[in-house]
Amino acid sequence: MKSKILPADPKAGYLAAEAEIDAAIKRVMHSGHYILGAENEAFEKEFASYLGVAEVAAAANGTDALELALRAAGIGAGDKVITVANTVTATAAAIVAVGAKPVFVEIEPETMLLDLGATEQLLTTVRDPRIKAVVPVHLYGQPVDLPRLMEIARTHNLAVIEDCAQAHGAAVGGRKAGAWGQLAAFSFYPTKNLGAFGDGGAVAGSDPVLLEKVRLLRQYGWRKRYVSELHGRNSRLDELQAAILRVRLGRLETENAHRAALAARYTERLRDGPVRLPATAPGRVHVWHQYVVRTPQRDTLRAHLEQQGILCGVLYPVPVHRQPAYHRVELTLPETERACAEVLSLPLHGGLQTGDIDRVCDAVLAWRP
Ligand SMILES: *Cc1c(COP(=O)(O)O)cnc(C)c1O
């Protein structure tokens, strides 16, 4: 029996830097500081410098980072926020958490990213003054057309809060995802390109007033200890995860290059195969958080691969507007719904080699829909 190929493998990220990560953990344990200390400060500076932003404020997870960013940007009760429905419900949950309402816009059929034409049309025809912000999701590692989005946002006076949970290192025209919007939110969930070994998140940006507000909101509204200036909450990153993330950040470019090489191998081998391959728009650096193929017979392909020990993911099987908690009876988004019915993430992570990708490709090519 051949070994199993997993869709993602966070343990491979540990094994690739085991000695360094062990040393980082030991350093924190001996420091006597476990929450918001020197490791957090160093990680925030290093990640800000990597992204090309002025500041990063770490948080407890990606959903919190989005919520803190929206609140810092002044989005609240009665406001509406444009986003997509082919995302993890966390994107919508953060919008709802600040008291706002998500406005789900259609996706482009090729990239499966927010359709900017549809966004512009909505803004010019509906002209709803309650629409205050847009949360673009850089899905699967490919950034949205950020120059165009920023132009639309300027014209319509919207805040842009980037959901970068799948796009650590992605870029458009040499400028990183996370360095475009007023603020950007990152997740360091273990399977993300930059993953901790527990929960973690961060808000990035270059406006010191907004970043200061995020820092207050993430810890009881404190600027000074025991003085709550704002109605804040607790969303801190612990020192162990910050120290681990510093090690992982040092390897991010190498690991993203490895992902890109594996993705290129899939594309080369599957060019004439039975599935639709992912489309990368020109001028964008895609960091291949997922390698997503499409077929209307997704479930039978998935079962065929599983029989051979190849496990695939589906991101996401049910769009947010069809989830019980967020159901919008009146809303139909045909491209979004079609994507959710057809997408299949082939295995892609740092622990795989070209031979593993070839095994997956052989199995896909042997499949008869
Ligand atoms: C992972 C993810 C989140 C949420 O991050 P958590 O750290 O799990 O809270 C938000 N948006 C997208 C697109 C994600 O992939």
Image (cartoon, rainbow, N blue to C red):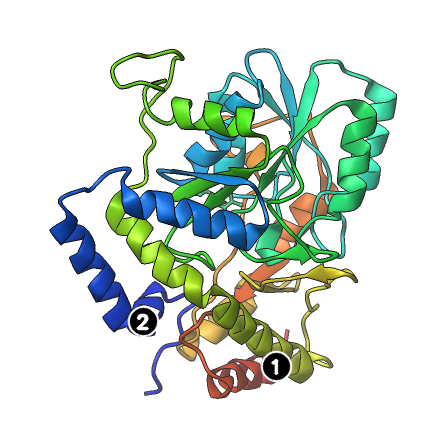
CA separation, marks 2 and 1? Answer: 25 Å
**Tag shown at residue 90:** none
Q: Which residue is mark 1?
A: 265
**In the image: residue 233, left or right of residue 290:** left
Seen at 71% across and 43% down, the residue is: 114
Secondary structure state at the residue bearing disc 2:
loop
Seen at 55% across and 41% down, the residue is: 54
**In the image: residue 96, left or right of residue 32:** right
Q: Nearer the viewer, residue 259 or 28?
A: 28
Q: Which residue is mark 2?
A: 17
The amino acid type found where label 2 is placed reads Ala
**In the image: residue 247, left or right of residue 297:** left
Quadrant where the N terminus sits is: bottom left
Q: Give the x, y percent position of residue 80.
A: 64, 20
Secondary structure state at the residue bearing disc 1:
helix
Q: Nearer the viewer, residue 336 or 40?
A: 40
Seen at 53% across and 71% down, the residue is: 259
Residue 50 against residue 68 in the figure, above or below:
below
Name the image quarter holding residue 154.
Answer: top right
Q: Nearer the viewer, mark 2 or mark 1?
A: 2
The amino acid type found where label 1 is placed reads Arg
Quadrant where the C terminus sits is: bottom right
Q: Is residue 166 visible?
A: no
How packed mark 1 is, by other alpha carbons closer than 10 Å (few <14, some 14-19, many 20 or more), is: some
Q: Give the x, y percent position of residue 197.
A: 30, 55
Residue 286 against residue 188 in the figure, above or below:
below
Q: Nearer the viewer, residue 336 or 369?
A: 336
Residue 354 against residue 139 in the figure, above or below:
below
Name the image quarter holding residue 271.
Answer: bottom right
Residue 206 against residue 212 in the figure, above or below:
below
Mark 1 or mark 2, which is nearer the start of the sequence?
Answer: 2
**In the image: residue 333, left or right of residue 308:** right
